[in-house]
Image (cartoon, rainbow, N blue to C red):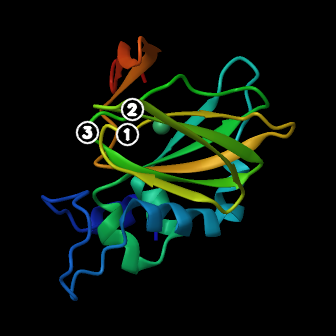
Amino acid sequence: MSSSTLLSRLPRRPDGGRPPTDDPTDRRTGAAGLAAALAAVSDRWLPLVDYRSTSRWTHLLPTGDAASLLDPDLHDDLAGAQVWLLSWLPSQGTPLHDHAASAGAFAVVRGTLTERVVAAGSGGIRESANGLTGGRVRHFGPHYVHQVTNLGADPAVSVHVYTPGLRAMNTYRIEAGALVRTGTERAGVDW
Ligand SMILES: [Fe+2]
């Protein structure tokens, strides 16, 4: 079956991206489940991955192509999601950013990525950092602020799932104990 045929067969939900509920008939797994499932079949998409010395390599995986890699039971989740493949050479990384209204998850497939998470609250800035090796999955809600960097010596590869699809990303710096927005990148304009 071609990817375009798979895409046309995917159910379309008006509530795409809504998190799973307590309803026992609700079998959605969410972005983290999709990221983990795509990581588990990485041998099938790793041949697509490229590495660029000038900037991180990113690839929007068409929904039909992602569907062809996944168990049909996950297609309902996939219909409300967007899948990106990323590679990270040593020292490559993102600025501090959020994903606007999109929630999501990412799974590390090769190498090690370091995720710095920043949360701003009434008590000021709270930060944490985690080294994420292959097989690790991180999931997050809307307006989650983080910075991801390859601090290791080897190239890294990750798969990212956003629900709903990424429409904008805001970048930040920390100033006087607060997050200060430094810019906004928008789908269709900046990528
Ligand atoms: Fe991110």
Residues at discs 2 and 1 in contact (Cβ within 8 Å): yes
In the rendered image, which residue does mark 2 sit on?
98
Does residue 96 appear to the left or right of 162 in the view shown?
Answer: right
Residues at discs 1 and 3 in contact (Cβ within 8 Å): no
Does residue 61 appear to the left or right of 115 in the view shown?
Answer: left
In the rendered image, which residue does mark 1 sit on?
144
- Can residue 190 be seen in the rendering of this structure? no
Residue 152 occupies quadrant? top right
**Looking at the image, residue 129 lies above or below residue 176:** below
User: Is the residue marked by circle 1 packed among few (<14), some (14-19), or many (20+) residues within 10 Å?
Assistant: some
Q: Position of residue 56 (x, y in %)?
A: 64, 28
Ligand 1 contact, mark 2 (Cβ < 8 Å): yes
Residue 147 occupies quadrant? top right
Query: Residue 79 or 108: which is nearer the viewer?
Result: 108
The residue at the point 80 percent across, 39 percent down is: 155
Ligand 1 contact, mark 1 (Cβ < 8 Å): yes
What is the distance, in whole Å, between disc 1 and disc 3 at their CAs?
9 Å
Helix, strand or loop under label 3: loop
The residue under label 1 is which amino acid type?
Answer: Tyr
Does residue 5 appear to the left or right of 127 in the view shown?
Answer: left
In the rendered image, which residue does mark 3 sit on?
101
Helix, strand or loop under label 2: loop
What is the distance, in whole Å, between disc 3 and disc 2 at their CAs?
9 Å
